[in-house]
Image (cartoon, rainbow, N blue to C red):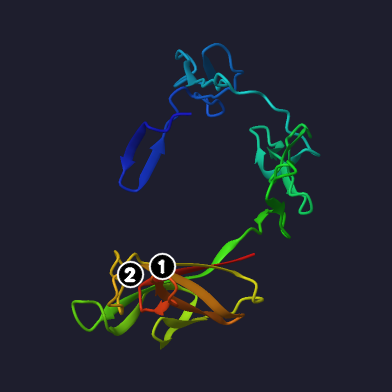
Amino acid sequence: MEWYKLVLVDESALSITEVDGDVTNELGSYTDMTASGAQNKIGEYKSSSSATAVVVNETLTNITQASGNETSDVTAGDARTIGTYKSEDGTDATINETVTTLSQDTASGQITYTNESNTTQTANVVAGETDNKLTVGANGGAYFAGPTVTAAGKVTMSYNNDTFTTYASHTVAKEYNIATVTRIDEGDYEITFTNAMDDMNYIIQLTVKDCGGNCPGNSNSNYDDPGITYYDQTETGFKVNIGDSDNGTNQKDDIDLEFMFTVIDF
């Protein structure tokens, strides 16, 4: 029905005339159609009963699966619902995602993966060779309980003159788990740990600096063979003695010489 033709009678009256004389008809109409071909016809419109119908279409979009992808049937029992979708006809559709599992046996360390088809794959954290030094830890991870460095240090020396004959002081140039390095007397030093060892059977490795045949504190040129030894080993530390011998019958002569040490425990 068209209402666009208006006749002005006077200032106080308005008359509306229906063009085709029939107030019961509708000149415009829409009809739902079924999708067909490359376009989807969703309706048609007529501006009048004698006018040519105008077809209203929508463009169809096709969704295709990309190369390399596979179709998976995700149904209840092997899927997790992540949402719902209401289709055009009002039907609720469930949106699922696939479910996989990953677990670990903390006793053996073995990790198991289960895919959507309930197929399992396993991976071992620790190899099964009998000579393997790794074991399975309390939480299932790989654990190594081999020897470790529990303390170490480097002690340098300074002297009172250019001939390097008289001790002046010593310095702990670098240390790990060392609380103090104390000079007891010439050639003797006490090393104290910051954290004590579990017992007194740890391994001590010692070395001294090469004095080039002229060790400090000795005037005799025969004293050119410095060495270092340990004593008084306890859980809290140990002592060292540094000396030089004349390669003959004379006793070792204590000297103050730069030294290093490493403590290993297991």
Three-letter residue code for mark 1? Asn
Identity of the residue furthest to the left in this view:
162
Q: Can residue 208 be seen here?
A: yes
Give residue 247's mark: 1
- Does dot 2 land on a helix, a strand or a loop? loop
| Most foreground residue, 21 or 91 | 91
- Does dot 1 land on a helix, a strand or a loop? loop
How many residues crowd mark 2 within 10 Å: few (<14), some (14–19), many (20+)? some
Q: Distance between the Cα atoms at labels 2 and 1? A: 7 Å
How many residues crowd mark 1 within 10 Å: few (<14), some (14–19), many (20+)? few
Q: Residue at x 45, y 77 (%)?
A: 251
Rendering coords of residue 159 (x, y %): 25, 81
Q: Quadrant of residue 234?
A: bottom right
Identity of the residue furthest to the right in this view:
77
Q: Quadrant of residue 145?
A: bottom right
Three-letter residue code for mark 2? Asn
For the C terminus, the image quarter is: bottom right
Rendering coords of residue 105 (x, y %): 77, 50
Q: Can residue 180 be seen here?
A: no
Q: Is residue 161 left or right of residue 57?
A: left
| Most foreground residue, 243 or 82 | 243
Q: Is residue 197 above or below residue 121?
A: below
Give residue 222's mark: 2
| Most foreground residue, 18 or 194 | 194
Q: Is residue 235 left or right of residue 75?
A: left
Q: Residue at x 41, y 88 (%)?
A: 185
Q: Is residue 179 left or right of residue 71?
A: left
Does the CB distance between marks 2 and 1 fall below 8 Å? yes
Q: Residue at x 65, y 34 (%)?
A: 87
Q: Is residue 238 above or below residue 79?
A: below
Mark earlier in primary sequence (2, 1) = 2
Rendering coords of residue 131 (x, y %): 71, 45
